Amino acid sequence: MNVKTSDMNVKTSGMNVIVTGGRGSSGRWVVDALAADHDVVVLDRSLPSNGGHPDVEYRALDLTKAGGTFDAITAIDPDAVIHWAAIPVAGTHPGVDVYRNNTLAAHNVLTAAGRVGADVVQASSDGTYGFFFAEETPVPDALPVTEDHALRPEDAYGLSKVVTEEIAETVARRDDVSIASIRPTWIQEPGAYPCRDPEYVTDRSAGAGNYWSYVDVRDVVDLVVVALAGVTAQASETETGDEGEGVEGVDDDGTPAVIAGHEAFNCAAPDNALGEPLRELLRDHYGRLPADCSIEGDASAYATAKAERLLGWKPTRSWRDAADEAVAPPEV
C-alpha cells in the first residue's frame, strides 16, 4: 500500500511542528507539505527575504550553538521536530566543518526535543553505508542493501550521519521519545534530474558510487509525513515488545505502525537512474556481484521494504516521468 501526503489515511493534523533546515532545497518541500495540516515553525540560519510561506513562522539561529537551540525549542515546546538541517554532502566544505556542523546540530536539536518530549524525524543518508565516498567503492555485502547493512563510512559526511543516528538512539532511550532516521539517496526535483544529464548517463562511473540510485523529493516528503505519523502515534502495551520495537505492519485502514525508540529507513526510487539491469551494471563496472544478491531487472540497489512494512510507504516516482515534469518548487 502506498500512502501519499495528499490521501493519507492517518490523523496527524493539528500538531505544533518544528522543521530545521526548512529553507533548504529539500526542506522547503517538507515544509510546504506539513504547513497544510500543522502549525510549522522553521529554524534556519537566516530568515527568508520574501517573507516565506504565508502559513509558516520563521526563526533564525545557529543550531550548532546549544544555548540558542535549547532556548528556541523549549520556548516553542513542539509536539514533534523534523530535523532536516545539515551540510548535505561531502566535498563542499572541509571535512572537519561538515562533521562538526552536522553532529553538533543533531546533538543540540535532538537533545532539546527529548527534554520537551517531542518525537523526531531526522534526515540521515545512504552515506552512512560508506559506499559513495570510499577511496575504493566496495561491492555491498548483499543486494538489495537493507537497513541492517554494515555502516562503514570513510568520509566526514557519512561519519557525521552515523553519529546523528547514534545520537537518536541515545535520546530515544534516555528520554522515551520516538525517532525515525530517513536515509535518502541522491535527491532529485521534478524537472531537474541531474541523474539523467547526458554526462551522467554516458559515463557509467559517475553514478557507480551509489550504484546509480536516486529518489524524487516528493517521495522523500511522503516518507517524512508517514514517519511523523509513526513516531507520534500512541502505543498500547500490546503494540510494542519488551525492547520497544515498532509494530510489525500497517493497520488495515492504512495507519502506519507505531514507531517506538529509534528506527532507520532507506529512501530510494524503485528503479535505478540508468534503467538497465542492475546486475549487469555491477558486473560491467565492478566485475562481480555479492554472493547474497536477489535484485532483478532495473531495480534500485536499496531495499525499501522496511518502510513499506512499518509505514505503508512505497516510492512511486521514476525518472521516466519525473525528469521532465513541470512542477514549480515551493516558495518557503
Image (cartoon, rainbow, N blue to C red):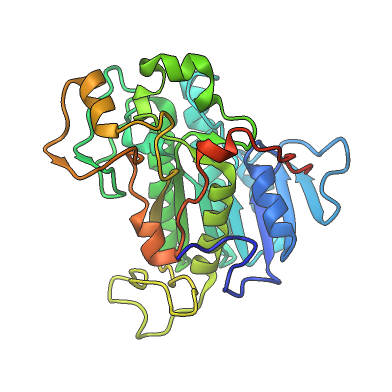
Residue at position x 39%, y 53% in the image: 264
Left or right of 78 in this view: 317: left
Residue 9 higher or lower than 301, as above or below: below
The percent coordinates of residue 34 (x first, y second) are 68, 58
In front: 316, or 78? 316
Write the residue at 72% across / 65% down.
Answer: 38
Q: In this rendering, is residue 10 above or below 213?
A: below
As rendered, which of 126 and 78 lies closer to the eye? 126
Task: Specify the quadrant that holds the C terminus.
Answer: top right
The location of residue 122, given as percent across then percent down, is 52, 50
Q: Is residue 330 left or right of residue 143?
A: right
Q: Is residue 171 left or right of residue 139?
A: right
Residue depicted at 81% across the width and 39% down the height:
47
Can residue 111 be seen here? The reply is no
The quarter holding residue 45 reads top right
Q: With respect to residue 257, does 199 lie above or below?
A: above
**Residue 199 in sight in this render:** yes
User: Where is the N terminus found, in terms of image quarters?
Assistant: bottom left
